[in-house]
Amino acid sequence: RHPGSNWGLGVLLKDTSIMDCQCWGLNRQPSDHRPLKILQYYTVSIFLSSLQSDLCVFCNRKHLEHITGVGPRPVGSVENEVLTVNYLLQQVELVRAESAAGPHAITVDVQRPTGSFSIDFLGGFTSYYDRVTNIAVRLEPKTGAQHFMLANCHFDSVANSPGASDDAVSCAVMLEVLHSMANLSTPLRHGVIFLFNGAEENILQASHGFITQHPWAKQVRAFLNLEAAGVGGKEVVFQTGPENPWLVQAYVHAAKHPFASVVGQEVFQSGIIPSDTDFRIYRDFGNIPGIDLAFIENGFIYHTKYDTPDRIHTDSIQRAGDNILAVLKHLVMSEKLADSSEYRHGNMVFFDLLGVVVVAYPARVGTILNYIVTMATFLYLAKKCSLPSNAGTYSGRGGWFVTLLSVLIVALLVTLIGRSMFWYSHFYTSVCLYGSAAVGKMLLVHTLAKNLYYGVSEPLQLELGELFFDVSLLLWCCVLVYLTQRGLCSAYVPMLMVAFPLATKLLLSGHFRNRGASLCYAVLYLLGLALPYAHLMFLIWVVFEIFTPIMGRSGTEIPPDVVLASLVTVATILLSSFFMHFIYLARSTKRVLAALGTVFTVMFILVSCGLFFPYSADLASPRPKRVIIQHTTRTFHAVDGSVERMDSGLWINSLDYTGMSHVTPHVPEINDTIRTRCADDLPFCGFPWFLPVKFLVKKNWYLPAPAVSPKSPLEFRLLSKQLTEWGAVKLSFEAKGPSHMSLYLLPQAGASLTGWSFGDGTPQFDLNGEYFIFYSHGLDAPTWNFWLEVQVDGIISVAISSHYFFGDDRRTPELDSLLRKFPDWAFTSSWVSMYQMYRY
């Protein structure tokens, strides 16, 4: 150990087995001698760099290995409710024992809440949970604290994934942050509640149980939420607030490796990305501000079997831990946490420059800055308009429209010939095909305009160069004014794209009309635009990093090539906006057009021939096709309770646009002859939807199979039927089944749903006349009882499905037989389910 510091150097003998080596005192207080096993894949450089951190990276890795080592952790499973809970409690107890002599106290509470709420996610539905698990750890000075920060992670996972990145690594980091803060020699000013919640994948249930029911929740003033939308990489701040700019300022000031974007916040909160986090629960139901952080890289393997600990780089864990520890320490020592309402009002503009430094300033300052830039631009343009011009009125906007239309036609052709998503495993191919088409078309339009519409005289070409620069400036300025008027902090992007080009143009005005100085002008011009363009390209990279993997799980109704081609074209237009005038300064564009045409033609031929397969099972960089298969038995009852019909089969859903076209050659029985259609007179088409996503996944297949017979079959019955004094019928039900069930309600023939026992008692989120209630429970939950209140003018169809995600009931021989036929590049999420429908 280095004297007076928190790091030390261990020497490993040459002939020592790394797997057997034990280290003591690594990055710990002198009294801490817990053994830490060094895994074989750590390199010396990583070992040494980790010693300079305030956190034990090897401990993070150890926690991550233990949590994921039990396998998938769906709510209600022993793996989630017992094994993981026991491990977390054991580690917390070790920290408490170790820090007992210090200035801090640790209190642990295991909460198992029951409740319900409605949420406008996936079209909107209602959620009901019973005895899900929260582990709340309260760290505070021994003298007590009145104000607390909340740090939140979730240890549950989806049923078919180890969930290393989502979200076991965050819980591993939180354990080490707890250890570090508990052993600080200086008492904290305020306290921290570390919440390890065990039901986030069930659409944010455990966080709702904590913030609405736990007595500690009333003392929470702000929160940090740790999430994942990918596997590894840098964790990005993509949501903050609402309002409370002091939180962003704290992050910018304290984080050792800041990475943040207000653009990501506004895109995410727009609902474009089909995902949500506990941030929404704390914001909407707790009315507290916070910061949402998430890993975003490599979303291709998010929620798959490939989300394993070995794919999360040690430096990602170390960087996240350093940031979270530094920000928490800063906030709990801050006076602002005690009375955060005093600093509530206002928003922040924040963005990082290439991940190196974060720029942040109040939104009101941003608004003033935006209008200053706007006024300067209009003064410049007004002066230009007062000068005589021979350049005409063509602005180039038509060229952009023609470019977008042409690229979309190419994307539609690719889709129609059955080559959709050819770029999923080879992203560069989309740039080569759609990018070359976009750049080539734009170049061609302006070249034709230059040669045919305007003529080729040099003075006029120079004047046209200025005109197109001014047009780009005006259009960016219009975007700036629009976003500023909408109150969007993302307006800083067009502000940068106006301010820097304008300043560069004014400084280089003497060079512009001198063709002999064109090389010097081009170099200086590029230097002037370097900062805004570098930032814009960085944002474009983030957009593709997020949206490209999402196309693999966005459903069967959205043509992904149209989306990606649109993004590539828009990116091309944005990046080319201040370079169009070079076309009019250049003597010829023939060679460039020929090269772009060759690239496009070759790529289109290769794509048409099927050379690029969308999916990959390469373990180094998997790109799996996502398929959901349920072996289900469906029973439909008449009004008198008799069984109208009953069938069983393997219900198959593809989560991307290609359907089963690539799977059918490997599994011939899955073909268009067994495609199903939605029965509109049945609740949710008469199929056991786990979540209300039928509007996204309309292509599905139903392969007949023997009936399922789980050991714990679904039991559903009507307990009572009462006529209320206001003329409605109150139906009381009892349901008993596995940990996950879905309830579907479809009022028909004039009936209307006027009340129920969920939430505040008012039915929420009518999905085209249907209602969806998501149910889950932890261990030892009682029978699910609920009631509905219906007007008596018609019939209501009530359906319920049960989903067996773990245990012996999850598999059947027929299901296993079908799964063995799938190619290795397909990732199948599979389970057993039952669907029962009744009419009343």
Image: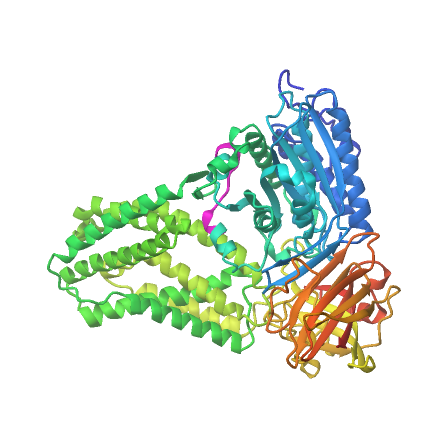
Residue 323, picture quadrant: top right
Q: Which residue lies furthest to the right in this view?
A: 711
Q: Is residue 471 left or right of residue 129?
A: left
Residue 793 horizontal/vertical position (percent): 67, 79
Picture residue at 73% right of the left edge, 58% below the top:
160
Residue 147 against residue 84 in the figure, above or below = above
Residue in the image at 84% along x and 75% along y: 707
Instruction: Tell me the quadrant of the picture where the C terminus can be found.
Output: bottom right
Q: In this view, does 287 lie above or below 660?
A: above
In depth, the one of 674 and 38 nearer the eye is 674
- The verdict on residue 260 being magenta is yes
Magenta stretch containing residue 765, yes or no? no
Relative image position of residue 661 (x, y in whole percent): 64, 75
Residue 527 visible (yes or no): no
Residue appearing at x 72%, y 67% in the figure: 788
The image's colour scheme reads rainbow
The residue segment tinted magenta is: 253-264
Question: Residue 338 location, x and y as percent?
Answer: 55, 31
Q: Which residue is drawn at 54% across and 43% down?
A: 289
